[in-house]
Amino acid sequence: MQIAVIADVLGEENNGTSITVKRLISNLKKRGHEVLVVAPGTSDDKNFYPVEKIDFKIFNDYVEKNGVVLAKPNETTLRTVIEKADVVHALMPFPLGRSAVRICNELKKPLTTAFHVQPENVSSHFGLQKSKPVNDYIYKNFLNGFYRFSDYIHCPTEFIADQLRRHGYTQDLRIISNGVDPAFVPGSVPKPAAFADKFCILSTGRLVKEKCQSELLKAVTLSRYADKIQVFLAGDGPLEKRLQKLGSKLPNPPVISFLKKDDLINTIHFCDLYVHCAYAEIESIACVEAITCGLVPIIADSKKSAAKYFARNESNLYRASDPEDLAKKIDFMIEHPEVRLSQREQYIRYAEKFRIDKCIDKMEEMFEDAVAGRHKPQIV
């Protein structure tokens, strides 16, 4: 098939959306599909159709700090690509995606969409991530301006599909994980000499409000083993300096840096525990990558996060926004290495369902159904 992928955000692999979109494109190509990509940026690929980025004027610095570049719609480019494609997959409810879905409807072109942007990801920029009226409005805005044009929505988890049903989305909701790169496999390597005697805890994700990494740093200060713990925050973002300042109070200040894939895998393989504190999360491939490698997690039980459903045991959950409870769970894991050893095998088996090949099978099925017009609307 000729599959058009319309991505408002597709830059550096410093956020989950860019990583998962590039992984989708790469794996579709491996299966022989011709993938036509419309996105901001540049590429040597003849099937990449670049568009300009939006100029936010005085807010450009803020946008840049968040590591996200949004595409400016170009109707000529969109029409050229959409007319060529057998099916169009529009990824985000922003200006480029909104233009694309309207053109698809005009041309009666098979269309699928994806739900990668949680309303809390938007409202957190204004400190309103916990405001129900604001987030409800964003759900409605996304539906009216984007998703109503499509019969299919790719939902990475049952959690976000349930949220869409609650907010009046009646489309055919396809629950398909974004999938884990085959490079993430169980393994173990020696700790770097500087951390050989430390209990190493990893947390992966953008350094932004809704990821709540500060809870982990506060929890370490409350731990009975604070002097033995070394935290690694793998990511970048606007809160880096704030987290460094908070972490400077620890006996062992955290190591904060963005890690490329090979370095991230190496870090997962030498760490003792993974902690995921996010308040809002549609799936969290970062968490899945860690457990796929056999790293046992402790996850916040936030009502707005799908990641909590990855926890296989009560010892792998802590009360969200409660560093004291997180500290207790960390101490338990330090004191019971036999629990971590047993759970490691449990998580490796559980993570098999997130392998990318299985997920691409389901994406292909959705595209084929869109072309054939087979869809099952939800009953809300």
Image (cartoon, rainbow, N blue to C red):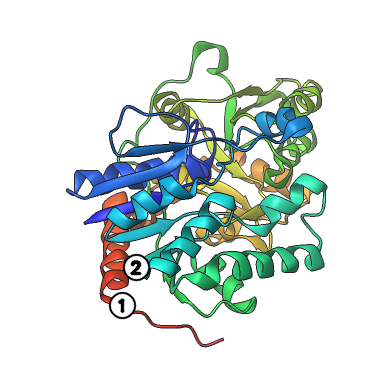
Q: CA–CA distance between discs 1 and 2? A: 8 Å
Nearest the camera: 377 or 319?
A: 377
At a point 56% along the width and 66% down the height, the residue shown is 160
The answer to whether residue 342 is seen in the rendering is no
Q: Going from the N terminus, do you reach mark 1 or mark 2 first?
A: 2
Tag 1: residue type? Gly
- Callout 1 environment at 10 Å: few (<14), some (14 to 19), or many (20+)? few
- Residue 263 location, quadrant: top left
Q: What residue is shown with label 1?
A: 373
- Callout 2 environment at 10 Å: few (<14), some (14 to 19), or many (20+)? many
Q: What residue is shown with label 2?
A: 110
Nearest the camera: 326 or 331?
A: 326
Picture coordinates of residue 126, whole percent (x, y): 81, 47
State which quarter of the image contains the N terminus: bottom left
- Residue 194 location, quadrant: top right
SS at mark 2? loop
SS at mark 1? loop
Q: Is residue 104 above or below residue 181?
A: below
